[in-house]
Image (cartoon, rainbow, N blue to C red):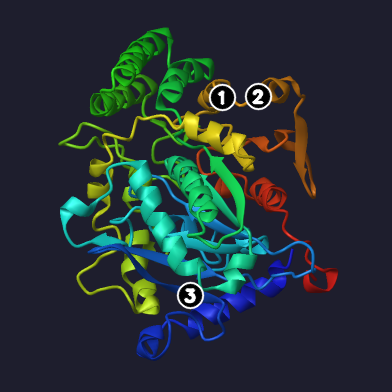
Amino acid sequence: MAVASLLPFLLLVFLSTTSISVTAARRPPGTADGSESWGYVQVRPRAHMFWWLYRSPNRVDNGSTPWPTVLWLQGGPGASGVGIGNFEEIGPLDTDLKPRNSTWLQKADLLFIDNPVGTGYSFVEESTLFVKTDEEAATDLTTLLKALYNKNNALQKSPLFLVAESYGGKYAVTLGLSIVGAVKAGELKLNFGGIACGNSWISAEDFVFAWGPLLRAVSRIDSNGEAESNSLAEKIKQQIANGQYEDATNTWGQLEGVILSNSNNVDFYNFMLDSGDDPVSATSLALSESMRIRRYARYLSVKASSAGSIDDLMNGAIRKKLGVIPKDVSWGGQSDQVFAALSGDFMKPRINEVDQLLSLGINVTIYSGQLDVICATKGTESWVEKLKWGGLPNFLKLDRTPLYCEGHGATKGFVRSYKNFHFYWILGAGHFVPVDNSCLALKMLGEITQSPAIPASSSS
């Protein structure tokens, strides 16, 4: 990996562009060397979506395997990929604006989008314009991709991989189908590489049924807590079956309260920790006063760093660097409304969409952190077993292959693959796999994207 040569480059790029607003009017937004570009796309009248593209300094063109691009899709709903995914998980710099050794730029170019509209720097000019379904979010994203790709030959040559976390997995599968349709119709010029869903909220029903047994197995709740949890999970199952999705969302909030009270506030993103002990997750687990649902507070709240909170960073130094954010728009200012607008779609499963992608021959990867609760591995395995894809029986019969990291003898994870379906079990990681097990996450990314090897002369 070219980490040694990558870090000075990243610092130079950032420091040289913090005053980009001075020249933004004279040229397209971005850095002078073309390593970064960003901007807005009006995906619908009065609905504006923000994107930020990083071009990797480690790009390799070996003539046969094209350098990939990863579109990172954050969860929430209402979580900012431009802020959270970029500065707290996989981007070139962390929240202290220091180089990240495990940046995914080592394996791909990175495209961050604040999705849906109203998330992060994205915004709507009136409240009726928030998306209410994952399909609507996919339509907006496809519109943005058309604006970026259809007149950009360089982007068209780079295969695009959708990599998603948490609720972002629902966006990924609906967007994947939208991309396939748009490409087939000749409306989008894009080389689609596939999708990877990490700890993704594909089937709420399967996850809520996993919580009680999982937490009892690791001694975080007792038999009484498990029984109470399972009872509410049954209620959620019935509400989903009846199409009462908003009611199911509200019951989900009640269930999380039961889990918290019976576990002495377990961290929903890592069952080894108490809420607030995880340096990546937020400290607040408060329920919404109006909806009685526990928001993804990790995403919608703040994270302290030596430089301040992520909100301070995004509404301060980064806003100044970008130079294109409207004066009346603050990063994350509409996030709560994004969540509320999607409350009727929040509990809807997307297993059928995964089935469709597999049947179309699209590469689908699932990865799951061992210590996660909210999107527990047990729940992920349960919804995977519901797939109608013809290759599933053969997939389930296969042995898993152990995974290691260079310089570490211990087992770091497992993988099982059959045809175009791949499942990674990531050990020692909770909900935020790229942070908790950065070594294996980077190794996995290289396998998913088939990133060309970096020449030895470049990695010294």
Q: Residue furthest right?
A: 456
Q: Residue at x 59, y 66 (%)?
A: 156
Q: Residue at x 24, y 29 (%)?
A: 246
Q: Tell me the kind of residue under disc 1.
A: Leu
Where, by quadrant of the figure, is residue 82 drawn?
A: bottom left
Q: Is residue 325 above or below residue 280?
A: below
Q: Tell me the kind of residue under disc 3.
A: Ser
Quick one: label 3, few (<14), some, or many (20+) residues within 10 Å?
Answer: some
- Report the mark closest to the observer, 3 or 2: 2
Location of the N terminus (image quadrant): bottom right
Location of the C terminus (image quadrant): bottom right
| Label drawn at residue 59 | none
The residue tagged 2 is 392
- The answer to which of marks 3 and 2 sits earlier in the sequence is 3
Q: Are marks 2 and 1 in contact (CB under 8 Å)?
A: yes
The residue tagged 3 is 37
In the foreground, 55 or 387:
387
- Report the label total: 3
Residue 370 in view: yes
Q: Element under label 2? A: helix
In the foreground, 215 or 206:
206
The residue tagged 1 is 387
What is the C-alpha distance between the residues marked 2 and 1?
Answer: 7 Å
- The answer to which of marks 3 and 1 sits earlier in the sequence is 3
Residue 384 image point, x, y percent: 57, 26
Residue 378 image point, x, y percent: 54, 23
What is the C-alpha distance between the residues marked 3 and 1?
Answer: 39 Å
Q: Tell me the kind of residue under disc 2.
A: Leu
Q: Element under label 1? A: loop
